[in-house]
Amino acid sequence: MDRLSCDRMFVAIMESGSFARAAERLGTSSGQASKMVSRLEQELGARLLNRSTRAISPTEVGRAYFERIRHVLEDIDVLNDAVKSRSGAPTGRLRLTVPMSFGVVLSSLLAAFARAYPAIELHVSYNDRVVNLIDEGFDAGVRIGSPADSTLIARRLCDARIVQTASRDFLKANPGLLHPRDLGRCNCILDTNLRDPFSWHFRDPESKEEFSVPVVGRLQFSSPEACLVAAEQGLGVAYGPSFMAGPRLRAGALVRLFPEFEAEPRGIYAIYPPGRHLAAKVRVLVDFLAERFAGQPVWDQGW
């Protein structure tokens, strides 16, 4: 139970607001986390946290200590990175969070990254909820759409286009789908992961104004992959990201609808917490992804 470990635990508790979350972040138990803070308080001769059965809060001394010690720990990490970089490639554990749907696309790239940087221990969490990087101890993340948290550093990797697709059999059985508003008279396959699965968004090719079309359908999935599988089976029109639909469009399993009405693409971003120094392991990951996504993404080619 060295002093630096106790300091790191205290910082993790302050950032996450919980002994349990801090313990999970640093790979130990809540009981051990409490002992580490108590040990730190004994060494300093001051109480850093007010504890109750419901909540914890920093004392005035604890708040002041946190503001100083987190920068000290950051400088130590930077120094460690600098020494390790001189003696070889970046090292250490790198915790990354990515969306479940885009994670399928990222898997091969992350495997290539792991091969390129064997000294980095890569831990990847696939999750469609919005993860708090700092509270949950992640070094970086990949997000679809502009990050809502303005305190995070974001680097745009590529576009995330949304397309409408259907099988040829479905289009033969449902002729006349010439305008997005025609969707109101056919079966649509709804992705309930979307913020509003019953409203699909488009952009007028002449005025460039965005508009939405209300849609209905008897099939609802909380998975864009399941929606595309259903569309391949001729069960309706799917609405989802081109990074998942692209291979099916290229193979001819699906046909794209209303290309001239495509909505403004969202961005796919690499994000990481702010700091005075960017850890080498995070820097090489972000640079690696940015290089691989430069230009038109492979999934948007050939259809």
Image (cartoon, rainbow, N blue to C red):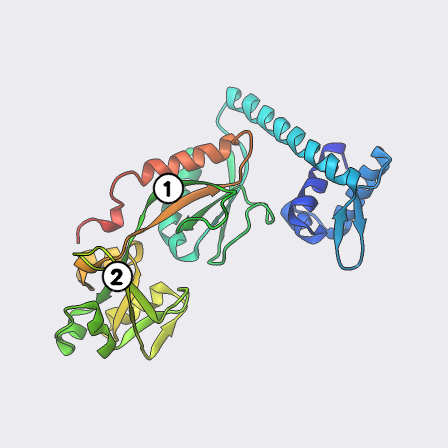
**Three-letter code, disc 1:** Arg
Determine which of the numbered discs, if any, sits on residue 203 in the image.
none
Residue 5 at x, y percent in the picture: 72, 36
Q: In this view, does 100 lie to the left or right of 171?
A: right
Could you say which is closer to the camera, residue 86 or residue 119?
86
User: In the figure, is residue 88 to the left or right of 74?
Assistant: left
To which residue does mark 2 refer? 202
Q: Nearer the viewer, residue 178 or 97?
A: 178
Q: Which amino acid does label 2 sit on?
A: Phe
Residue under the point 25% across and 57% down = 209
Q: In this view, does 300 lie above or below 155?
A: below
Q: What separation in Å lies between label 1 and label 2 (alpha carbons)? A: 22 Å
Relative vertical location of residue 91 with respect to residue 216 in this rendering, above or below: above
Identify the secondary structure beneath mark 1: strand
Residue at 33% of width from left, 35% of height from top? 291
Q: Residue at x 55, y 50 (%)?
A: 132
| Element type at mark 2 | strand
Residue 258 percent location from the top left of the image? 18, 63
Local crowd size for mark 2, using a 10 Å CA cut-off: few (<14), some (14–19), many (≥20) = many
Q: In this view, does 249 lie above or below 14?
A: below
Q: Is the C-beta separation of discs 1 and 2 under 8 Å? A: no
| Residue 118 appearing in the image | no
Please report whichever mark, 1 or 2, sits nearer to the chain's N-terminal start.
Answer: 1
Which mark is in front, 1 or 2? 2
Location of residue 201 (image quadrant): bottom left
| Quadrant containing the C terminus in the rendered view | bottom left
Image side of residue 125 versus residue 175, left or right: right
Query: Horizontal and vertical percent for residue 133?
Result: 55, 47
Q: Position of residue 139 (x, y in %)?
A: 53, 41
Residue that numbered label 1 is attached to: 156
Q: Residue at x 39, y 49 (%)?
A: 107
